[in-house]
Image (cartoon, grey):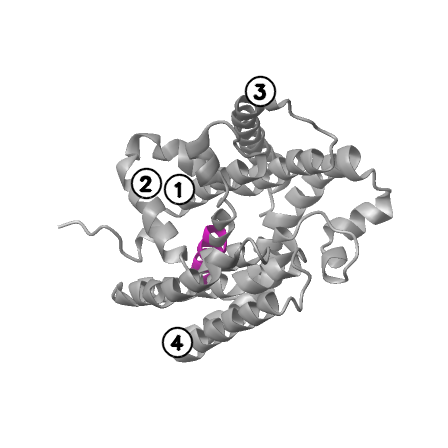
Amino acid sequence: MNKIFCISDISKFRSELMGWAIMWIMMLHFTFITIKPLGFIAQYGFAGVDIFMLVSGFGLSFSLDNNGNISSYLRRRLIRIFPTYYLIGIVSSLIIFHDNIPTYLFRYSTIGFWSNGIYWEWYIPSIVALYFVAPLFKKTIDNGYNIVISTIIVLLLVMSFIIVSQEIVNPKDPHFFFLYRTPEFILGMICAFWTKKGITIKYFYCILLLGIPFFILLFPKHHDIYNYKYLSLAFLLPIFVISFTSISKLTKPINPMISLIGKASLEIYLIQAIFFQAIITNKLTINPTWHDGITILLIIICILLGILSHWIINKYVLVCK
């Protein structure tokens, strides 16, 4: 009898999970205002990043198994990120920021983000920082200290709750997104450990059962404090993972396309970030009459440009990867 979900599904449908996640993120950024069902789904698209964090932690655990040499592991990870980041960043700087060369280099080095200076977006600086600490997390998990790691996750989530509820961090400070998504990254590494050891799924469901009360506590207050909505949805991450792997099992004919989108998700994410930045800075205005149609068009354009960019960068830039 086929199970609805098992931990190894994260590996089996890894690209599909990233494909669904990036489309959900774009639905959030470009929004729907007249197609109400899509609008309801789109408003929670930030949970697509939660999926990305878990899948990234999961994938890095296996990557570290295949690259015992830490310097080799870091080289491969950084080569995957920074050439793409700098190349697509050129377009962003020309269209949005009008950077000079020193500012451009500073922005895309991620130094600006961590020094409270100029930056483009928060995700790439955050995932790069997690690349460096992932070997330590993995070593701790592999040594059997699941309780220690679980405690770290709980403490980080409690810290996030305190920071949000007391408004210690500005409600729209991008560093908050790094803080509360780090436990999800660690959870991904734990899921990889469970997969390799063939550990039962019951732990995954226990995480969900523990998270539901926090979701119920936080979510109703999201109108009062901006980041409550983001933090509350993090506790439902197991539901999102189970849902999208289940969808992937039901949509096998289109899985190759969703998988292709997932493999190009870095490029798609950065390209959609250019359009998103143009919209929020009023460099690109959308007529309300045609809003939802343009949203669909923008999603399609970002996917096509992202896949094309992914192919070009892998064929002509990352030849030494």
The foreground one among 218 and 234 is 218
Which label lies toward us, 3 or 1?
3
Among the 4 quarters of the image, the one containing residue 127: bottom right
Q: The residue tagged with tag 4: helix, strand or loop?
A: helix
Magenta stretch: includes residue 108: no
**Is the residue under label 4 in contact with that under label 2 (CB below 8 Å)?**
no
Q: How far apart are marks 4 and 1 (CA)?
A: 28 Å
Q: Residue at x 27, y 37 (%)?
A: 250
Q: Mark 4 points at which residue?
A: 146
Q: Distance between the residues labelled 3 and 4?
A: 51 Å
Which callout, 2 or 3, points at the residue further toward the start of the chain?
2
Tell me which amino acid carries mark 2: Ser
Q: The residue tagged with tag 2: helix, strand or loop?
A: helix
Neighbour tally class for label 1: few under 14, some 14-19, many 20 plus, Cα within 10 Å: many
**Is the residue under label 1 in contact with that under label 2 (CB below 8 Å)?**
yes
Q: Main secondary structure of the magenta part?
A: helix
The foreground one among 62 and 289 is 289
Label drawn at residue 248:
2
Q: Residue at x 42, y 61 (%)?
A: 215
Neighbour tally class for label 3: few under 14, some 14-19, many 20 plus, Cα within 10 Å: few
- Residue 316, can we see it? yes
Q: Distance between the residues labelled 2 and 3?
A: 31 Å
Tell me which amino acid carries mark 3: Trp
Where residue 135 appears, as percent x and y from the top left, is 52, 69
Which callout, 4 or 1, points at the residue further toward the start of the chain?
1
Label drawn at residue 16:
1
Q: Mark 3 points at which residue?
A: 290
Q: Give the range drawn in magenta.
A: 51-63
Where residue 253 appears, as percent x and y from the top left, is 30, 30
